Image: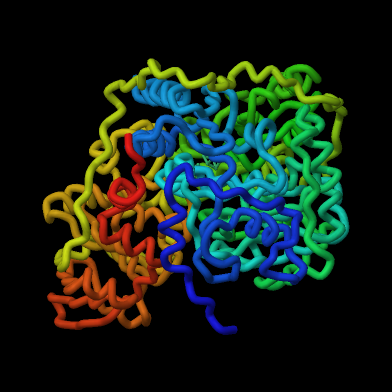
């Protein structure tokens, strides 16, 4: 197919904050094509404000809703503040507190106060600590079929379970979207995941997404939207769909989406939001540019992702007998009422095995309240579960680190080495059913053997106290931003130099995660709003001493393998290295959100053209990148000279015209300040 010419000027013209274009209804047939469309096509086309909805082409999307969470949100809101706007320009922006709730010192609470005051000042809904995990609460209270959602968290695609096009991004992209700017991305291909049959008892939605990961790996979704279709779809509830779209993030997919149907309507009605329903289905002969994967739900068996990668999947039957010291049920993947009521029904009247610590974290206050009302909570407590407040908690290493060398079964979505807070822990990702079975028997066992000992009735309508949601009032000009000592100013960066020279500070292999680059956990996460402090921990687990080396050498370069930066959306994995003086990352390939974050903070993402070039560079080598600005402006390659070995090679630097401007300016904030700021 002939490549469509990118619309050069259009992007810049349309990025002006507040300049919102009216969008068409997702179900209306676009003028540009008569082809039958997928659900993703419909939402993309209805929100496209620049570029072409053709796979591989740059696209600007209108953002209807945004979400931020505290760990990425402090930066996002500082960046929004730096844009100088008086109020958010989205239909809805929600600022959640769910990650940093341990409060072992003043840091978390400083962040909470800052975020509450920015929400008030700039017109965002504020979800207070204890209200729940952003994705669960958003699914319950705010998500709308057919709309777009941009979130500063990689699991934002959870809302795809409701028929939303929900994308994870760095905080700076979300800040720009809150200012009314479109979100820019490369138009993905759409893969059809055709679901047939019905899950058998003891097999769950978690096993569906583990099966997807088993088939396509942590790289298989890159550049793609995973769209679920087929008769199996209507057998899954919205929270089950959300488990699948949530963990679709682990395939590297841009997002995942389900159609919006009678099941979606029932969920919205349950949430007292029937008016938000909109039916959305793929046209009968829709063409899926990314191909098709068939899954027979009735043929699935319980699965687990073994240490240390979500795609290292094996059937539970092969893991029988493993003895976990810990079982944790929760996270944005598996903490719905359905999940926890299922666990309560399996555990009722029985005792958790004496060698297992069972930790349960409900996804939201609404979930906790439903469990309290129908007796499931008391039953779980009686069985010996440790019940935590609704938050991310153990998922991001905020408490509940396993004992040394322990096996921990978790219903979460990521099991990267060390993420649990214990470097040598062995974390397996499983369904709530498999977790419950192991908690009872003290070993991994097939949950299909376990019978429910009680039934807990689900409420007909959700309990809607919303007591921890603060809705913004009309603008209060006098409202002040609260800035405790943990809130440090944003660092400023210089434009890209003409010539760059420095040392290779570290060389890594494949699939380096953002948890490797910028770890989280109870010690480091509270420093997210203090870049000089958090920068000390860059690569701490995989390359101790990196920060001091980078500082003493005045910065340098990092080498990576395939899929560099997979995992979280945390822009700190770009911002903190940049603060330490990292000016380019040379890798075989990059994960989508991290690539965007590198560009947003002015770090050159350079891709090796051939494996031999990766092989001929090592840590400690001195590199020189000559004529950078000239080369980037005239093409998409950069010359790398290895001063140590005298080798020389070219690397690819694929940038859209807008990304090039951002890189030249030294980062997106500089670019936005230069080009987009409205008069104050
Ligand atoms: C995660 O699951 O890794 C996180 C913590 O939610 C991150 C966001 C962050 O690092 O703050 C994510 O998924 O984007
Ligand atoms: Fe929170 Fe874990 Fe979900 Fe990330 S994956 S948003 S840390 S619950």
Rendered-image quadrant of the C terminus: top left
Looking at the image, the residue that sits furthest to the front is 679
Residue at position x 35%, y 56% from top? 598
Does residue 372 sit above or below 40 in this rendering?
above
Between 204 and 193, which is closer to the camera in this rendering? 193
Task: Give the colour scheme shown.
Answer: rainbow
Residue at position x 55%, y 46% from top? 63
Picture quadrant of residue 223: bottom right
Residue 118 position within the rendered picture, expressed as x and y whole percent measured from the top left: 42, 26
Residue 495 position within the rendered picture, expressed as x and y whole percent measured from the top left: 21, 56
Does residue 4 sit above or below 572 in this rendering?
below
Rendered-image quadrant of the N terminus: bottom right
Q: Is residue 571 visible?
A: yes
Residue 535 position within the rendered picture, expressed as x and y whole percent measured from the top left: 27, 43
Residue at position x 68%, y 61% from top? 41
Q: How many labels does the image show?
A: 0
Residue at position x 85%, y 49% from top? 235
Does residue 421 sit above or below 607 in this rendering?
above
Q: Is residue 105 visible?
A: no
Task: Determine whether, in the image, residue 378 is placed left or right of residue 674.
Answer: right
Residue 87 position within the rendered picture, expressed as x and y whole percent measured from the top left: 45, 31
Between 97 and 360, which is closer to the camera in this rendering? 97
């Amino acid at each position: 197919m002939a490549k469509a010419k990118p619309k050069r000027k259009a992007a810049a013209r349309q990025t002006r904050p507040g300049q919102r274009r009216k969008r068409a209804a997702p179900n209306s047939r676009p003028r540009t094509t008569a082809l039958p469309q997928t659900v993703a096509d419909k939402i993309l086309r209805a929100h496209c404000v620049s570029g072409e909805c053709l796979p591989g082409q740059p696209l600007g999307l209108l953002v209807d809703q945004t979400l931020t969470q505290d760990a990425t949100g402090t930066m996002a809101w500082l960046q929004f503040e730096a844009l100088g706007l008086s109020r958010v320009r989205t239909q809805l922006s929600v600022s959640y507190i769910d990650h940093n709730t341990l409060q072992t010192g003043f840091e978390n609470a400083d962040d909470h106060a800052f975020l509450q005051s920015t929400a008030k000042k700039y017109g965002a809904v504020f979800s207070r600590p204890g209200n729940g995990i952003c994705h669960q609460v958003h699914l319950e209270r705010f998500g709308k079929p057919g709309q777009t959602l941009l979130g500063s968290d990689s699991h934002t695609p959870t809302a795809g379970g409701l028929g939303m096009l929900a994308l994870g991004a760095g905080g700076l992209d979300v800040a720009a979207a809150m200012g009314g700017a479109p979100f820019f991305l490369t138009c993905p291909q759409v893969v059809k995941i055709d679901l047939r049959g019905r899950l058998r008892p003891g097999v769950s939605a978690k096993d569906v997404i583990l099966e997807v990961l088993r088939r396509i790996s942590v790289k298989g979704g890159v550049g793609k939207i995973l769209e679920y279709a087929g008769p199996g779809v209507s057998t899954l509830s919205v929270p089950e769909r959300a488990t699948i779209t949530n963990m679709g993030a682990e395939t590297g997919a841009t997002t995942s989406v389900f159609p919006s149907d009678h099941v979606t309507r029932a969920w919205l009605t349950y949430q007292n939001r029937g008016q938000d329903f909109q039916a959305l289905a793929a046209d009968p002969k829709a063409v899926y540019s990314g191909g098709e994967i068939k899954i027979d739900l009735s043929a699935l068996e319980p699965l687990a992702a073994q240490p240390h990668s979500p795609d290292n999947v094996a059937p539970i039957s092969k893991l029988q007998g493993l003895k976990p010291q810990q079982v944790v049920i929760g996270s944005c993947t598996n903490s719905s009422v359905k999940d926890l009521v299922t666990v309560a029904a399996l555990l009722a009247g029985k005792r958790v095995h004496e060698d297992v610590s069972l930790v349960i974290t409900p996804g939201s206050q609404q979930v906790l309240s439903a469990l309290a009302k129908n007796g499931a909570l008391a039953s779980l407590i009686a069985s010996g579960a440790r019940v935590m407040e609704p938050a991310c908690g153990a998922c991001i290493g905020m408490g509940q680190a396993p004992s040394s060398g322990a096996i921990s079964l978790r219903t979460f979505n990521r099991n990267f080495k060390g993420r649990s807070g214990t470097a040598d822990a062995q974390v397996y990702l499983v369904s709530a059913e498999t977790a419950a079975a192991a908690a009872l028997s003290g070993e991994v066992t097939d949950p299909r053997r376990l019978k429910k000992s009680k039934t807990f009735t689900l409420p007909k309508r959700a309990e809607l106290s919303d007591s921890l949601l603060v809705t913004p009032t009309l603008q209060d000009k006098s409202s002040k931003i609260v800035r405790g000592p943990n809130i440090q100013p944003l660092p400023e960066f210089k434009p890209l130099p003409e010539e760059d020279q420095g040392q290779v500070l570290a060389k890594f292999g494949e699939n380096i995660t953002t948890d490797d680059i910028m770890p989280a956990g109870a010690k480091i996460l509270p420093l997210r709003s203090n870049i000089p402090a958090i920068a000390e921990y860059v690569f701490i687990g995989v390359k101790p001493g990196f920060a001091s080396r980078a500082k003493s050498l005045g910065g340098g370069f990092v080498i990576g393998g395939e899929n560099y930066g997979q995992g979280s959306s945390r822009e700190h994995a770009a911002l903190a290295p940049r603060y330490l003086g990292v000016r380019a990352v040379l890798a075989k390939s990059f994960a989508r959100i991290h690539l965007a974050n590198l560009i947003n903070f002015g770090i050159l993402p350079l891709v090796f053209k051939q494996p031999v070039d990766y092989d001929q560079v090592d840590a400690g080598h001195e590199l020189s990148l000559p004529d950078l600005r000239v080369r980037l402006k005239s093409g998409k390659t950069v010359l790398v000279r290895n001063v140590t070995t005298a080798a020389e090679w070219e690397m690819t630097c694929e940038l859209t015209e807008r990304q090039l401007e951002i890189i030249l300016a030294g980062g997106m904030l500089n670019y936005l300040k230069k080009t987009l700021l409205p008069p104050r």
